[in-house]
Amino acid sequence: DGVGEWATTSYGVGNGTEMKIQAEIHFPHSLGLLYSAFTHYLGFRVNSGEYKLMGLAPYGKPAYVDLILKNLIDLKEDGSYRLNSEYFNFSGGLEMINQKFEDLFGGPPHIPDKPYAQKQLDLARSIQDVTDLAMLRMARHVRKVTGEENLCLAGGVALNCVSNGKILAEGIFKKVWPQPAASDAGGALGAALYVYHQHFKKPRTVGKWPSGIQGSSLLGPAFSDEQIEKVLMDSKASFKKMSREELIQASAKAIADEKVVGWFQGRMEFGPRALGARSILGDPRSTKMQSVMNLKIKFRESFRPFAPSILAEKVSEYFDLPTDSPYMMIVAPVSEKRRLPENEQKNQEAHGLDKLYVQRSEIPAVTHVDYSARVQTVRREDNPLYYDLIKAFEVMTGCPLLINTSFNVRGEPIVCHPKEAYQCFLKTKMDVLVLGSYYLTKVSSDHEDQVQYTAVELAGAD
């Protein structure tokens, strides 16, 4: 966590309906708040910009790791730690850091939306490496003292899918399961389940691995075709109602033609990741798609990576991922056989954000600059329609994965209601909108003259 009541890091063991906490670290010592301090220092908004820092980190070098470990955090071999309060102001003030922190790193915080120098890239990489190190030490210690083979992760820091991937890759535990809403939202669910099972002694059902009883985490609101059609009629939209198979084929064809598709289906995801219910989809083979989706659809920073949704049975053909990742919570390397060795030298020689323009693999739109990807594996039993869409795309192209990013623009939450999806579609350069059984294109839209979002309007928004 950043901080709960007082605990910031804790571990325990669950058995049946019982869960017992074995050790805790308390505020103001917090790995999450340390990461948030650097989030602030790099010009991002605390409690929402941490994932931007994580995306920026691979562009830099770990030049400040030793400085951080020497001055800011006393990290022990067992993963326990203490922060040096001389450099922070969050325990008694309204600011994350103080003048001494700024002096340590040679200047004031980065101004939001200003270009990044190598220093900022190196700072992002350094705090990510320190976080990885702390998480790995904790994981080894917990494995040693508990003897347990399976690890569940929750709390805001568990949204750091890079660190999650490092724990999995090292083989410390046989299975690693990050809670898909590993933040305050998931904490509320956990509190309810804790009371239900541990206080009221209700029996607990364990679902099938890897999704468990939470399934694909599609626990939010859903809207019927009748409700969707009313929204479209009220908006005077032009649309075509299709059968399930027609919808899948038309959508897969649009993506294969390098069109960007807004995908609104069924119950909304619970958690911060779009998992195929409120998603914007694209072709991962496209060399231009990352830039197009970042700048023209999402209106966000060009360095931000996109995640792939892949058929679960095909994951080993594209990624070095020995397990399922249904919640897009684990980063894994792109398989060597999918990389482009002829461009590896270019990637090594490029500096900073220039690395963005080097094509590194057969799936460039979802391959980050360090040859990694935040993978979502999709099984048909969890989301049949989404699975069948990816399968149809594979039949057309030979590629069993799609770009999957959340259905929203910078500064706004993921769309929930059909009207929100339609408005987002109109105000961006999205090509196709699929709402339930209804298929819309910009050509058929009667509202092309509506005001577009602009980078100016969204400047400073997170």
Image (cartoon, rainbow, N blue to C red):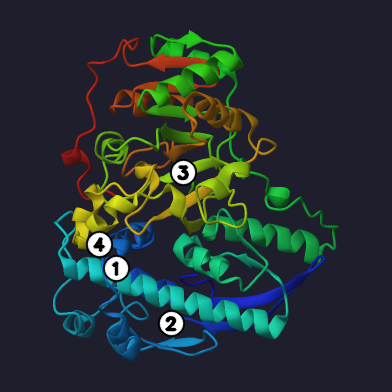
Distance in Å between CA atoms under marks 3 and 4: 24 Å
Q: Is residue 266 visible?
A: no
**Residue 42, percent from left and from top:** 24, 66
10 to the left or right of 264:
right
Instruction: Say which element carries label 3.
Output: strand
Q: Disc number at residue 28? A: 2
Query: Mark 2, residues whose alpha carbon is within 10 Å: few (<14), some, or many (≥20)?
Result: many
Compared with 305, 424 (above or below) is above
Q: Amino acid at mark 2?
A: Pro
Q: Can you identify the residue that label 3 sits on?
A: 308
Q: Amino acid at mark 4?
A: Gln
- Asked whether 351 or 63 is in front, the reply is 351
Which residue sits at x=60%, y=17%?
244
Distance in Å between CA atoms under marks 1 and 4: 18 Å
Distance in Å between CA atoms under marks 2 and 4: 39 Å
Which is closer to the viewer, label 2 or label 1? 1
191 to the left or right of 399:
right
Query: Mark 3, residues whose alpha carbon is within 10 Å: few (<14), some, or many (≥20)?
Result: many
